[in-house]
Amino acid sequence: MNAGQQIWNGDFSFSVAGSTNAKDLTLGGGNINLGTAAGTSRTITTNGGALLTAPSVISNGTTANSLIKAGNGFLRLNGNNTFTGGVTLNAGVLHIGGNNALGTGTLSINAGGILPRVASRTRSRRWW
């Protein structure tokens, strides 16, 4: 994808067959807005062994302000994100790419696991 702004107006899935990382996908370098479509969250479902990376700043949309991670795959959030509704981890692995990768809301872990990309993290908010 190019470096233009992305608008996520709905939930989406990224799936690969098998347990390979040969098909990792990075969603370009443009900032991401959580869109104008109805709903307060966007569910990202990842399945298989590949890693989906959102490298840029994710900001609130008109209605949506949070992310839900579903599926048994991997999602990496790398940006200095400003969305305010938090992240819910329902399955799979969430890679935390920096101190502000989770926005300013709460991280709720219902299932799955987290993986920081570097050894130290500063987190002033609660993790659940």
Image: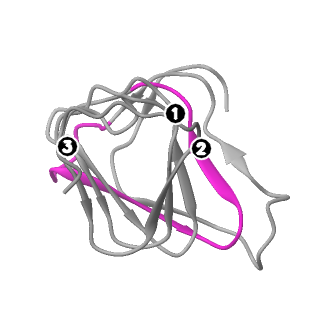
Residue 42 located left or right of residue 4: left
Residue type (three-letter) at the residue carrying disc 3: Ala
What kind of element bears circle 2? strand
Which quadrant holds residue 69? bottom left
- Disc on the earlier residue, 1 or 2: 2
- The residue depicted at 47 percent of the width and 27 percent of the height is 79
Q: Residues within 10 Å of mark 2 (few under 14, many from 20)?
A: some
Distance (Cα) linking label 3 and label 1: 19 Å
Q: Residues within 10 Å of mark 1 (few under 14, many from 20)?
A: many
Residue matched to label 2: 53
Query: Residue 36, percent across and down?
Result: 22, 38
Say above or below: 94 vs 82.
below
- Disc on the earlier residue, 3 or 1: 3
Q: Nearer the viewer, mark 3 or mark 1?
A: 1
Count of numbered circles on the image: 3
- The residue depicted at 48 percent of the width and 34 percent of the height is 120
Distance (Cα) linking label 3 and label 2: 20 Å
Query: Residue 32, percent across and down?
Result: 42, 30
Which quadrant holds residue 9? top left
- The residue depicted at 18 percent of the width and 38 percent of the height is 125
What kind of element bears circle 1? loop
Query: Residue 100, percent across and down?
Result: 36, 28
Say above or below: 71 vs 83.
below
Residue matched to label 1: 78
In the image, 93 versus 8, the foreground residue is 93
Query: Residue 90, percent across and down?
Result: 34, 71
Marks 1,2: beta carbons within 8 A: yes
Residue 27 located left or right of residue 11: right
Marks 3,2: beta carbons within 8 A: no
Residue numbers of the magenta segment: 34-57
Residue matched to label 3: 64
What kind of element bears circle 3? loop
